Amino acid sequence: MNVEQMIARGRQVLVLERDVIAVAADRLDASFANAVQLLHDCTGRVIVSGVGKSGLIGRKIAATLTSTGTPATFLHPTESLHGDLGIVGPHDVAILLSKSGETTELLPLMEQLTRLGVPTIAITGKVDSTLGRHARVAIDAAVREEACPHDLAPTTSTTLALALGDAMAVVLLEAKGFRREDFARFHPGGALGRRLLLRVREVMLAEDLPILPHGATMREAVVELAKRRGICLIADEARQLLGVITTGDLSRLMESGREVFTIPVAEVMHRSPKVIEADALASAAVHVMETKGVVAVPVLDGSRRIVGVVHLHDLLRAGVA
């Protein structure tokens, strides 16, 4: 194969896997909601199992559930029959993955789970298989073909199983009200934990702030904009925010041809600027800046008093943006 053929074939595989997920999304039905509800009501842990490539996907699903607030563990079906079944409790729920629904090693585990009264969710390519028929809920993971040219190596089928697992985990965390702060508690180490735990007050500029009184002119504002990285805050004597002026406002004003320096800041300022509180997550400040197209935001305390300014490059330096 030459370079062009390799690229073309790679694109075919990606399109095929994309289309498989799109078809599954269209046929998603009440069984999916029933599976999520079963997981939501679980007071024990989620036991995930599968063999071969399905087992690898099962490990990922268990890891995703655990990191998003639902305790889960992977149980190898063969090892379960040699002592590891002891980790299964009466309040658990199981997710079993099998393309055929007839995996020899998985069916004995299914039998034992049924004996223990553990409800099961099957993610299978054949909902009318033994696994599908005996599961409490069966989710259709059928694919027309694998991306493998011989239709043998699990490719589209494992991609779909993984996507369905992700879909369940995401809907489940929303149903549980799982928040950014909760996610941070499960990821305290490294850049991810730092990014999710950092508060605005830890990165904001808190001293020598670019604040002007309501009666100031644009001459004073220009000085502050130059010194304080493109933002000027207008406040009353109690430091209650009245408005904001940015370098963008100054540029537009200069293009108007007017005498800039004598214009009152009250005539130019935005009276309802986007703000953020000091105790908010730094990542929330990034979101505000991205959605509003600004590079700096005033920081207020609980009484709406100015306590700082947070700049995009400070967030970048802190590894948040």
Image (cartoon, rainbow, N blue to C red):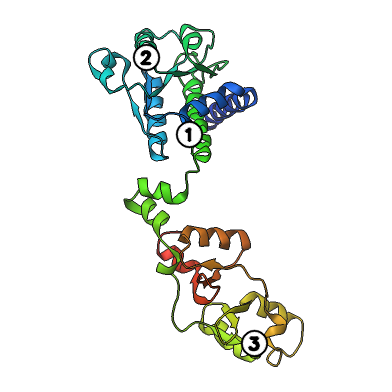
Closest to the observer: 198 or 303? Answer: 303
Q: Is residue 61 left or right of residue 231?
A: left
Question: Residue 249: which quarter of the image?
Answer: bottom right
Q: CA distance from mark 3 to mark 1?
A: 51 Å
Identify the residue position indicated by label 1 in the image. Answer: 169
Image vertical order of residue 97 relative to residue 264, above or below:
above
Q: Indicate the amino acid at tag 2.
A: Leu
Q: Which mark, by number, is residue 182?
A: none
Classify mark 1: helix, strand or loop: helix
Crowding at dot 1, Cα within 10 Å, few <14 / some 14-19 / many 20+, comes out as many
Q: Position of residue 319 (x, y in %)?
A: 41, 60
Q: Indicate the amino acid at tag 3.
A: His
Image vertical order of residue 10 relative to residue 185, above or below:
above
**Mark 2 vs mark 3: in front:** 2
Crowding at dot 3, Cα within 10 Å, few <14 / some 14-19 / many 20+, comes out as some
Identify the residue position indicated by label 2 in the image. Answer: 113
Upstream in the sequence, badge 3 or badge 1? 1
Q: As drawn, which residue projects farthest toward the right?
A: 257
Write the residue at 38% across / 36% down: 66
Upstream in the sequence, badge 2 or badge 1? 2
Q: Position of residue 183 (x, y in %)?
A: 42, 46
Classify mark 2: helix, strand or loop: helix
Crowding at dot 2, Cα within 10 Å, few <14 / some 14-19 / many 20+, comes out as many
Identify the residue position indicated by label 3 in the image. Answer: 214
- The answer to whether residue 3 is visible is no
Write the residue at 52% across / 62% down: 285
Q: Indicate the amino acid at tag 1.
A: Ala
